[in-house]
Amino acid sequence: MDTQTFFTYRVYRLSENLLLGMGCSVLVLLRFVGGMVLVGCSFVDVPSLTATINLTERLSWLITSSLTCGAAVDVIIAASMLYYLKKMNLGSNTKS
């Protein structure tokens, strides 16, 4: 989460686009909250022998959603960084 938050801030500063920064921040926050809910549920299910199987079956939607949010924010950050850094590259900055 720390890395994604850092690069979300970098994208926001580079693009100066509040909507892009807030969108990435929301995805990072959703992934964090999903992970914390999974940690909490796994601690509650520790006494049962089949805790991992039951937890995976019961919360498969949350696991998938958290991983999807993480992947989506990674792709958005990478694409935004490529776009805005390429946009900043001027012809006078390159050496021939």
Image (tube, rainbow, N blue to C red):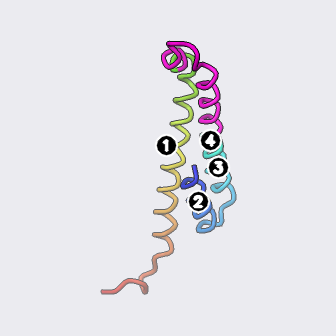
Q: Judge left or right: residue 25 versus residue 65.
A: right
Mark 4: which secondary structure? helix
Of the two numbered discs 1 and 3 on the same chain, state the one appearing first in sequence. 3
Q: Amino acid at mark 1?
A: Ala
Q: Position of residue 68 (x, y in %)?
A: 52, 37
Observer-nearest of 77 and 66: 66
State the separation of the CA atoms marked 1 and 3: 14 Å
Of the two numbered discs 4 and 1 on the same chain, state the one appearing first in sequence. 4
**Location of mark 3 (residue):** 23
Of the two numbered discs 3 and 4 on the same chain, state the one appearing first in sequence. 3
State the separation of the CA atoms marked 4 and 1: 13 Å
Mark 3: which secondary structure? helix
Of the two numbered discs 1 and 2 on the same chain, state the one appearing first in sequence. 2
Mark 2: which secondary structure? helix
Q: Position of residue 23 (x, y in %)?
A: 64, 49
**Location of mark 1 (residue):** 71
Determine crowd level at label 1: few under 14, some 14-19, many 20+ residues with C-alpha closer than 10 A. Answer: some
Mark 2 or 3: the one toward you: 2
Q: Amino acid at mark 3?
A: Gly
User: Measured along the vertical axis of the image, is residue 27 above or below residue 95?
Assistant: above
Q: What are the residue bounds of the magenta stretch?
A: 32-55
Q: Position of residue 46 (x, y in %)?
A: 57, 20
Q: Amino acid at mark 4?
A: Phe
Determine crowd level at label 2: few under 14, some 14-19, many 20+ residues with C-alpha closer than 10 A. Answer: few
State the separation of the CA atoms marked 3 and 4: 14 Å
Q: Amino acid at mark 2?
A: Phe
Residues at badges 4 and 2 in contact (C-beta under 8 Å)?
Answer: no
**Location of mark 4 (residue):** 32
Q: Position of residue 5 (x, y in %)?
A: 60, 55
State the separation of the CA atoms marked 1 and 2: 16 Å
User: Measured along the vertical axis of the image, is residue 81 above or below residue 34?
Assistant: below
